[in-house]
Amino acid sequence: MKIAVRFGHMKNCDFGALGIRPEYDLVREYGFYIISGLQKLGYEVYNVTPESANTMADSLMKGVSKANKLGCNYFISCHANFYDGKEHGSEVIYFTDSLE
């Protein structure tokens, strides 16, 4: 099974939420643990985070396009975006059109 992982947000156009630490930095730190953990479980995992993008939509489109070209079964987009003075964890959004 092929899994695409995209680290949410881009430094130049959509930095993400600010809290204890900037979301951009945080997801790039924990995202590698997701990739490593899935690889240890035997999955074929690809980091589809684009090198650059002009807008948030452009960033997402580039990640999804790369995942589709690689034939990935799952697409995981990593975020950590809820902070109102207290941390509320993080979210991982995934999508598949597979019926597996």
Image (cartoon, rainbow, N blue to C red):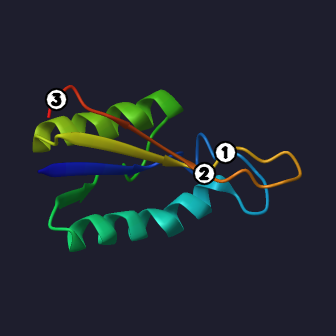
In the orientation shown, which residue stands out farthest toward the right?
85
Looking at the rendered structure, the kind of residue marked 2 is Ser
> From this viewpoint, is residue 49 visible?
no
Q: Is residue 84 in view?
A: yes
Residue 61 image position (x, y, % from top left): 35, 31
Q: Residue at x 22, y 50 (%)?
A: 3
Residue 81 tag number: 1
Identified by mark 3, the residue type is Ser
Residue drawn at the location 73% of the way across and 50% of the way down? 88
Q: CA distance from mark 1 to mark 3?
A: 27 Å
Q: Earlier in the sequence, mark 2 or mark 3?
A: 2
User: Which residue was labeled with disc 3?
Assistant: 98
| Rendered-image quadrant of the C terminus | top left
Q: Nearer the viewer, residue 52 or 97?
A: 97
Q: State if disc 3 and disc 1 touch (CB < 8 Å).
A: no
The quarter of the displayed image where residue 93 is located: top left
Is 32 left, or right, of 45 in this rendering?
right
Per the image, the residue denoted by label 2 is 90
Q: Determine which quarter of the picture holds residue 71.
A: top left
Q: Nearer the viewer, mark 1 or mark 3?
A: 3
